[in-house]
Amino acid sequence: MKHFYQQRQKPQSLVDEHDEDGGFADNISKALREYSGRLFGSSGKLRVPGFFDTLASSINITQDRITRSRMAGDPPDITLTPKLSHLGLLEFFRAEEAIAEGEDCVVRMMPQLQHFLYGD
């Protein structure tokens, strides 16, 4: 039995025709390749996610939905969004990397923060 991705995959030439600007189709294509790589691994065999992978994904999905719902009802004045999607829920050994990205995020958003706080 073939996996859904293998059955539904468009020929690469069709995907490439619409990706000149790195737009929506490019993002979808990239996401599907990453998903397939995680699912099948480098050997091409189906890799079933473990208990903690499933639990972490469920927690992330739930937290994301709660956050989006609350932000829609009472939007923040400024949102700081560090780029941490590559870190897993239980990867505590990568704390220094997460902290550094948080600091970089504040530096990137400093003009907006100063404008909000001081009205400059």
Image: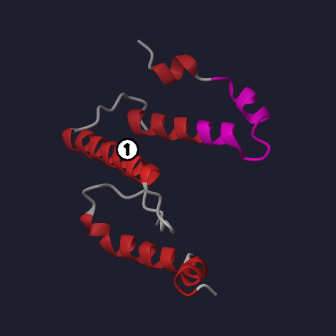
The residue sitting at 32% across, 68% down in the picture is 94
Q: How many residues crowd mark 1 within 10 Å: few (<14), some (14–19), many (20+)?
A: few
The x, y position of residue 97, in whole percent, is: 38, 72
* Figure quadrant of the N terminus: top left
Q: Is residue 40 above or below residue 10?
A: below
Residue at coordinates 33% horizontally, 32% vertically from top-left?
47
Q: Is residue 64 magenta?
A: no
In this rendered view, identify the residue nearer to me: 120 or 21.
120
The image quadrant of residue 102 is bottom left
**Residue where numbered disc 1 is placed:** 65
Which quadrant holds the C terminus? bottom right
What is the chief secondary structure element of the magenta stretch?
A: helix
Instruction: Determine whether, in the image, residue 57 is placed left or right of residue 71.
Output: left
Q: In which image quadrant can residue 115 be found?
A: bottom right
- The boundaries of the magenta stretch are 10-29
Asked whether 37 or 70 is in front, the reply is: 70
What residue is drawn where x is 42% and y is 61%? 84
13 inside magenta stretch: yes
**Rendered position, 113 above or below 57:** below
Question: Considering depth in this image, is 42 or 23 the residue closer to the camera?
Answer: 23
**Callout 1 amino acid:** Arg
18 vs 79, left or right, is: right
Residue farthest left in this picture? 51
Q: Secondary structure at mark 1?
A: helix
Residue 4 lies left or right of residue 90; in this view the side is: right
Tell me where residue 92 appears, x and y as whole percent. Answer: 25, 65
Residue at image coords 53%, 35%:
32
